[in-house]
């Protein structure tokens, strides 16, 4: 029998520990993973800070992405002002386009998938500068949705959720580009 590294007087039987101190292996694995992730500097992506105290956001027509940008900015340190001349920058949503096209057909010629596309054209201007900080630029997002003749209402609701998801994605993408342009000013 091999000799123990510590005398038996220093070893405690498992019954000496309350059951609350014994963790299952999955909990230990989860704790180790969290420790590793937090130690490497990982953090969840939050709302982007654009680096400006004041900003104006306008749109040519009813833009859901502009509304999402306003919501995001209102939750952060940037103050939205209604008059472009009073703001450090003016973000203009020039155009927002939604498209739904047939993407896949079955062998019988029926629609199997649609492609949803949301495109936003915008520009960023700074008062006192002739050239825009961001020239008119278009960003887009695409999603696929399967088609079902038996559940049209459910598919319509899913389509609206996908468009909402694309709006949030494009708003964050635009704000990241605004922050990058601000850093270069």
Image (cartoon, rainbow, N blue to C red):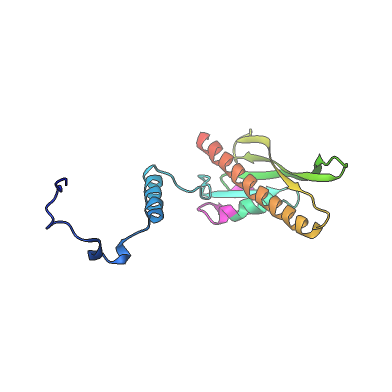
Could you say where residue 97 lies in the image, as x and y percent from the top left? 76, 44
Could you say where residue 69 lies in the image, as x and y percent from the top left? 62, 50
Could you say where residue 155 lies in the image, as x and y percent from the top left? 76, 55
Residue nearer the viewer, 59 or 160: 160
The residue stretch that appears in magenta: 72-86
Query: In the image, what residue occupies the spot 65% across and 51% down?
Result: 165
Query: In the image, what residue occupies the spot 66% across and 34% down?
Result: 135
Above or below 10: residue 178: above
Residue 82 belongs to the span the image colors magenta: yes
Above or below 161: residue 51: above
Query: In the image, what residue occupies the spot 43% across and 44% down?
Result: 42
Residue 80 seen in this snapshot? no
Q: Tell me where residue 173 sits by quadrant.
A: top right
Residue 11 seen in this snapshot? yes
Above or below 117: residue 131: above
Residue nearer the viewer, 106 or 116: 106
Residue nearer the viewer, 51 or 71: 71
Residue nearer the viewer, 5 or 64: 5
């Amino acid at each position: 029998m091999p000799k123990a590294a510590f005398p038996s007087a220093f070893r405690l039987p498992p019954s000496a520990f309350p059951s609350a101190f014994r963790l299952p292996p999955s909990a230990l694995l989860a704790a180790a993973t969290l420790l590793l992730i937090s130690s490497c500097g990982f953090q969840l992506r939050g709302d982007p800070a654009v680096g400006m105290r004041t900003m104006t956001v306008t749109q040519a027509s009813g833009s859901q992405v502009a509304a999402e940008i306003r919501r995001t900015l209102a939750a952060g340190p940037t103050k939205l002002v209604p008059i472009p001349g009073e703001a450090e920058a003016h973000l203009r949503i020039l155009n927002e386009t939604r498209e739904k096209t047939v993407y896949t057909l079955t062998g019988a010629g029926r629609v199997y998938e649609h492609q949803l596309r949301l495109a936003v054209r915008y520009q960023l201007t700074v008062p006192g500068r002739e050239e825009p900080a961001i020239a008119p630029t278009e960003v887009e997002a695409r999603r696929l949705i399967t088609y079902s003749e038996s559940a049209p209402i459910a598919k319509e609701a899913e389509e609206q959720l996908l468009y909402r998801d694309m709006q949030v994605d494009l708003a964050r993408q635009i704000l990241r580009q605004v922050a990058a342009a601000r850093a270069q000013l």
